[in-house]
């Protein structure tokens, strides 16, 4: 794990989590993103003076956020999706021109598949 600016108790908990999930990270589920999400959740608990042990629901939430952010990053790298921040600083997602072309292509393929299945019945 790389060095960061989180308090040491948070770094220790994150390290334990990463070790417990060893072998679970791949290109679709990024370890760095998981570390970020877990650190942010633990920082929130730390600032509230709460125990730094995470319950299953919290871990599942971290994994879900990690998965979504990793997939969005992957789609952005492929040039299919982009983002802008609105006036409130919220991230807005939108398809690029290439993303719109791929969407149309997939829509056409889906319709062909549905028609093929209707013909078979």
Image (tube, rainbow, N blue to C red):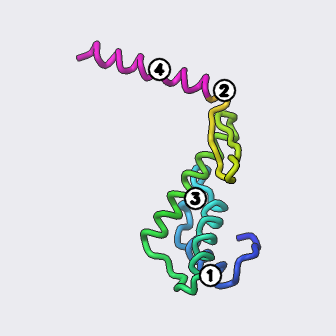
Secondary structure under badge 3?
Answer: loop
Label 2 to label 1: alpha-carbon separation: 43 Å
The C terminus is located in which quarter? Answer: top left
Circle 4 packing at 10 Å, graded few (<14), some (14-19), many (20+), is: few
Q: Name the residue tied to disc 3.
A: 25
Q: Reading the chain from its start, which is encountered first: label 3 or label 1?
A: 3
User: Was residue 114 drawn as part of the magenta stretch in this picture?
Assistant: yes
Secondary structure under badge 2?
Answer: helix
Secondary structure under badge 4?
Answer: helix
Q: Name the residue tied to disc 4.
A: 109
Label 3 to label 2: alpha-carbon separation: 29 Å
Q: Name the residue tied to disc 1.
A: 47
| In front: label 2 or label 1 | 1
Label 3 to label 1: alpha-carbon separation: 28 Å
Task: Say whether marks 4 and 3 touch (CB < 8 Å).
Answer: no
Q: Reading the chain from its start, which is encountered first: label 4 or label 3?
A: 3
């Amino acid at each position: 794990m790389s060095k960061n600016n989180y308090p040491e108790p948070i770094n220790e908990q994150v390290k334990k989590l990463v070790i417990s999930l060893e072998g679970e990270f791949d290109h679709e589920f990024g370890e760095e993103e998981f570390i970020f999400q877990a650190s942010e959740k633990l920082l929130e608990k730390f600032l509230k003076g709460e125990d730094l042990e995470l319950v299953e629901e919290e871990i599942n939430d971290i994994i879900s956020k990690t998965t979504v952010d990793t997939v969005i990053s992957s789609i952005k790298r492929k040039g299919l999706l982009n983002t802008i921040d609105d006036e409130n600083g919220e991230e807005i997602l939108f398809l690029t021109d290439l993303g719109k072309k791929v969407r149309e292509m997939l829509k056409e393929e889906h319709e062909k598949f549905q028609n093929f299945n209707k013909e078979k019945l």
